[in-house]
Image (spheres, rainbow, N blue to C red):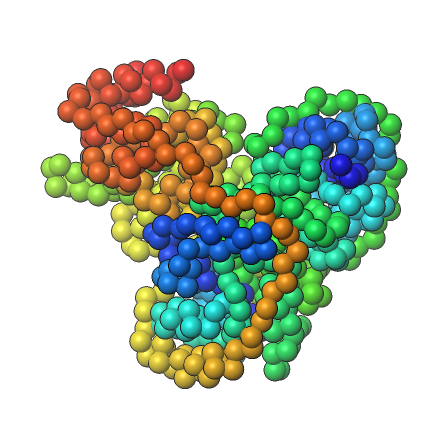
Amino acid sequence: MEKVLVLLHTLDGGLPAAALETLGLARQLGAPWDLGVVGAGATAAAQSVSGGAEKCFAVEGEAFAASRYATDAAACEAIVRASGAPLVLAPDTLRFHRALPGVAERLGAAIDTHVVAVSGDGTIERWFYRQRIEAGLKGGQRPWILLIEPGSQPQAEPAPGAPPERLEVACETRTSVEGFSTPMTGEQTIRPDAPLLFVAGAGWTKKQKDGAVHLEEAAQLILDFVRKSQCSLGSSKSLVDLSSEGQPVLPFLTHLHQVGQTGSSPRHKKGLATCCHGEEPHVVGWRFIKERRAVNLDPNCGWARGKADVVYVADAFEVMRELLKLL
Amino acid sequence: MSYQIVVCGGLAPDPLQTLEPVFDTVKPSLRNELMLPAVFDPWAAHALYEAGHLARKHPGTLVRVVSLAPKAKLQQVMMTVAQKLPFELAALDGPGGGFTDAAATAEALAEAIAAMPDLDRSRLLLFGGWESATRGAGVVMQRVAERLGIREQFLAVDELVVEPDGALLIKERVEGGRHQISRCASPPAMLAWATGSLPEPPNHPQTGMANMRVILPALQKARPVSLAQTAEFVRVALPSAVRQTRIVKDVPAADIAREIAEWIRQ
């Protein structure tokens, strides 16, 4: 196996879980490896996990603390050049997903993202067509940058080692990072650490048995369930789109909750879909949900056709009222 | 200030279609790929709607779409997309689909953009989707921007606001259901859009007819493009997991709730 560069970034001064997963994969491959870390506190973070690395590099400083294309790309480019390793493994975080394709272009490198497996013979696995087709491929071009899908690998135990060589990198940019905003107040969107994903489908906003829409009760039931079960909250595209079509909507759902073709593909152990038909554009986002159950009035919905383990043919309002009594 | 907005977008199979891969080590494909109904790639479509919105607010702004796809399919899809908002098309006649090489695609798109007449890079906003619904790699836009010398890049953008001084205030998705807010002093910049916040514009037949007067000649002039492949595929398959679904019906809601509660606690 050829030499590997493990390229990581810090988050809030430490290494995020996705970084430790990438490190774990690199160690598992058994190839000689270098380490590079970018971001605030990169020197300390690199030393905390550099045990076993042949060479270790860090780029830090005020300019490199924030997640920003120009500075991240410059830092990563410097580390990849300094290492010279033909294979680069990095976590597929949004920070690196933004920066590393540009780095690949500068280096004349190949890049593959959302990689879920790397084997010793250099074959990688990733999904195409939004998790509808899986493929194994070998890259003929070097350097080859692989962004490892968070949640797909076990985390490495940190093993401290030698301090890194600090690289000085200069970069000009017209972009400043101003801060962060959270669209929801108190309601979580997709949280990778939650054991359960709860998906609210468009049926919650439709007329019920009495011929009326019960939006307030639907909102209350969903929010109570999310708070009591500490689950992730997702929605189908149809529910998200209703807001743009002027139809009644659950006010706390945004595009950030969307799961599926144009939304996220979260990795939770369990998923519970309610008032959602289980159409393919939504279900492609469930590819990595291991145990799936659905509550739907239609016994012929998409979930019933091999997409869920259990389908409860029932009124979701009634089921959720009863379920809340038990939680 | 007016802008020159270039939207990169390809085609994707209609999401309701069943996809079946055909294995080939050099270039796998989909069974009956040319027969599958196609749509404009969903995230690129969001980028296009945002471009149209920005153009309406900044008179003099020009929206151009660059698309690499089989010409016949592109023409079919453009009949619909052209009804949404005014734009010009630069068409590249080449293979679409998820198994094409991202770097080669980026090279072809960047060449097409660089060759556009009257391209003013100081006013250039390069738009596209943050991933495609086909390859789903999310790397083409950054590569195109690098080739065009654009070093201000933003990924998974949900909002763009132009401030009075001309600065671009941009919200990008980051982990944890949050947005990172960045200020870019001026164009050129690349924005790879997530879903944004705008609805799909209603069809406007008059806009469609006006657009097609420009789009059809552009399609006729579409430059043929062949894409080199650097990766070797060793396996392409549908995921094998089909679940044996248990249907629970005619059971009181309380019993169902009890079963779900136990399952959640396991």
Q: Is residue A186 above or below residue B45?
A: above
Quadrant placement of the C terminus of chain B: top left
Image quadrant assignment for residue B205: bottom left
Give the left or right position of residue B30, taking residue B119 as reference. Answer: left
Image quadrant assignment for residue A93: top right
* Location of residue A198 in the rendering, given as x and y in whole percent from the top left corner: 38, 31
Q: Residue lying farthest left?
A: A210
Of residue B30 and residue B153, the one placed in the foreground of this image is: B30
Q: Residue at x 39, y 16 (%)?
A: B265
Give the left or right position of residue B234, taking residue B152 as reference. Answer: left
* Location of residue A82 in the rendering, given as x and y in whole percent from the top left corner: 85, 45
Image quadrant assignment for residue A29: top right
Q: Residue at x 44, y 79 (%)?
A: B215
The reply to whether residue B20 is visible in this rendering is yes
Q: Is residue A136 above or below residue A291?
A: below
Q: Residue at x 15, y 24 (%)?
A: B250
* Location of residue B113 in the rendering, given as x and y in whole percent from the top left corner: 61, 73
Q: How many marks?
A: 0
Q: Residue at x 87, y 39 (%)?
A: A166
Give the left or right position of residue A246, taking residue B148 as reference. Answer: left
Quadrant placement of the N terminus of chain B: bottom right
Give the left or right position of residue A291, taking residue A318 as reference. Answer: right
The reply to whether residue B172 is visible in this rendering is no
* Location of residue B37 in the rendering, given as x and y in whole percent from the top left corner: 36, 61
